[in-house]
Amino acid sequence: MSSKKLATFLAENLEDLKGKGLYNVIDPLESANGPMIIINGEELVNLSSNNYLGLATDSRLKEAATEAIQQFGVGAGAVRTINGTLKLHLELEEKLAQFKQTEAAIAYQSGFNCNMAAISGIMDKNDAILSDELNHASIIDGCRLSRAKIIRYNHSDMDDLHAKAKDATESGLYNKVMVITDGVFSMDGDIAKLPEIVQIAEEFDLITYVDDAHGSGVLGKGAGTVKHFGLSDKVDLQIGTLSKAIGVVGGYVAGKKDLIDWLKVRSRPFLFSTSLTPADVAASIRAVELLTESSELNEKLWENANYLKAGLVKLGFNIGNSETPITPCIIGEEVKTQEFSKRLYKEGVYAKSIVFPTVPKGTGRVRNMPSAAHTKEMLDQALVIYERVGKELGIITE
Ligand SMILES: *Cc1c(COP(=O)(O)O)cnc(C)c1O
């Protein structure tokens, strides 16, 4: 017999979410996740993916994945420590370390898993973690899992971080103290103030941890936010994902050899969850090679992002203070933001609305993610639709 308590819990809470307009209906794609996508038979300009460099559908990656399947099969067969480590995994880790200019790297099944693995692999209940209030959900969960004391500081507020770092280290309550931040914040596209963070970390001997999911492949000519600031030897843990700019799936931690050796014997997603498939690994290796060989895709991404941003500003939209290709179009009121996104969709642009509680009340936005794979024609098509819908809803003036 199934649980009545569970049935009631689910029915009530689903009802509640639907009543508040917070129940998300997912649109399945009928095409690859490229710069144009097909949903419900309609072709749309896709401004919603994290596939920054267009690598998710790149023929060179597809070829590498196909070859790896032919040679090694579709699954790795075990966790890394039993016999799920193929030579390919080690090759990927070497390439990632070179790319990040660190001594070593370790690959995980996802970026989310990296934060589960690395934070709780290093920190415990005798420690404290200083965490930016806008950090990604997986950082928050990783911190919770570690059982360390979590001390949130105001978003990118270096005075607040300094004061809290001083308090935490001088209190004598904690063994180790870590500062943890996104490299690029995905809702506004702003960059963490890493030079100041590193300076504060040096003053108080903090462990530095940067989750660069949105910075890798984008900043620092592709090598990420830490490289962008020239701090490769000053950040203890750099997290990256293989699922955004790299276009595949997986994640990695890059840092000193001792750190990586430790994570290989102590981090639980590495020890207790099957490793990345041969196809994922081979495609990721190819992607890292491409980024190392040439900055062409990275340059194209920035060119497209700047083009889209300039176009939206010229039309009169508020695009906030993004410093990266992430281009929010700030509408404000929640209901209007959702209506705007729906109208864009009807007209042929797929750009998702993001509203409270993901972002503060009254700052609802439609978030645009241009990529290297978009053509000028696609972006122009999107801008024409933005103009039409913006005028129709009175967001920009005639
Ligand atoms: C997307 C993201 C992740 C999760 O990465 P996946 O590879 O998709 O699991 C982790 N951290 C940050 C900051 C992210 O933006």
Image: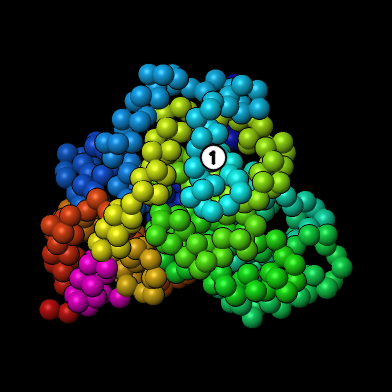
**Quadrant of the drawing holding the N terminus:** top right
Mark 1 closeness class: few <14, some 14–19, many ≥20 residues within 10 Å: many
Mark 1 lies on residue: 93
Q: Is residue 68 above or below residue 254?
A: above
User: Is 307 in the magenta?
Assistant: yes
Above or below, 82 against 361 in this view is above
Pick whichever, 2 or 324, lies toward us: 324
- The quarter holding residue 337 reads bottom left
Q: Does residue 285 appear left or right of residue 345 in this picture? A: right
Could you say which is closer to the camera, residue 374 or residue 103? 103
Query: Magenta stretch mostly in which secondary structure?
Result: helix
Identify which residue, 386 or 296, lies in the foreground: 296
- Residue range of the region highlighted in magenta in the rendering: 306-318
> Observer-nearest residue: 299 or 271?
299
Residue at the image position 27 percent from the left and 68 percent from the top:
306
Q: Is residue 30 above or below residue 215?
A: above
Instruction: Give how far across and how far down residue 365 sits, in percent.
Output: 35, 66
Q: Quadrant of residue 62?
A: top left
